[in-house]
Amino acid sequence: MIDFLFPQIGGVELTAKGVLCSIGVALVLGVILSAVYLFCNRRRGYTSDFPSAIVLLAPLMASVIFLVNSSVAAAVSLGGALALLRIRSNPRDTMDITSLLFAIVIGIGCGTGYYGISIVITVILCAIMVILSVSDFGTPKKNQLLLKITVPESLNFEGAFDDILDKYASDWHLNQIRTSDFGSLYELRYMITLSDKADRREFLDEIRTRNGNLDVIMTLREFDFVSTK
């Protein structure tokens, strides 16, 4: 059994039994990875078909190694070519990209016959994923926000909201200025840390009265990104 899980020389016997065993182990580990992914993203949400893709990717990569005659170099090269495809190109989905790479590693490990190493890697990294998710590692605090204020072209926005921000935020800075609607509007993006006793409704109301009741958006920092389009 030990020799089966931790062989001295990698490789899968290209028989029905060997192929099915390799695909079966990869499939089981893919299911475990998918379940951990679902748990870690239960609050943020996820694309409905992505967990299924994770499950299928591990045995798919194991099958790729069979097709290239168990050549690890060829399989890794093909995996690199697949990674160039913009499967998950949104910068907010870095955990999705990590999960895809994780599934590829599982598939390569099972396809080369290193079942024990693949199992150990899966257990350790899945445990780390769960710990990071439960501990909210890297997640901004609820009072660390991105504030987007739309102002008309006629309003001089230089210092227009400084007094309001000083009143309600313990820390803030202007991060970005951009135009919209063919230059007729400006959008100001502030990184702010609200005071613990700040009333968010009063805060937004004071901003609305000053920007002419145009759009004011306040979100957690982790959910915002700057489009490059």
Image (tube, grey):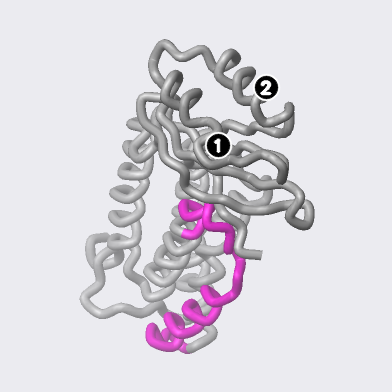
Res. 44 mark:
1
Picture coordinates of residue 192, whole percent (x, y): 44, 33
- In the image, the segment drawn in magenta is 69-97
Residue at position x 58%, y 43% in the image: 188
User: Crowding near pointer 1: few (<14 within 10 Å), some, many (20+)?
Assistant: few
Can you say which quadrant of the picture contains the N terminus?
bottom left
Quarter assignment of residue 73 = bottom left
Q: Amino acid at mark 2?
A: Thr
Q: Nearer the viewer, residue 140 or 87?
A: 140
Can you say which quadrant of the picture contains the C terminus?
bottom right
- Give yes or no for residue 9 being in the magenta stretch: no
Q: Nearer the viewer, residue 158 or 41?
A: 158
- Give yes or no for residue 75 being in the magenta stretch: yes
Quarter assignment of residue 207 = top right
Label 2 to label 1: alpha-carbon separation: 33 Å
Res. 209 mark:
2
Question: Relative to 11, is 149 above or below?
Answer: above
Q: Nearer the viewer, residue 94 or 37?
A: 94
**Badge 2 or badge 1: first in the primary sequence:** 1
User: Crowding near pointer 2: few (<14 within 10 Å), some, many (20+)?
Assistant: few
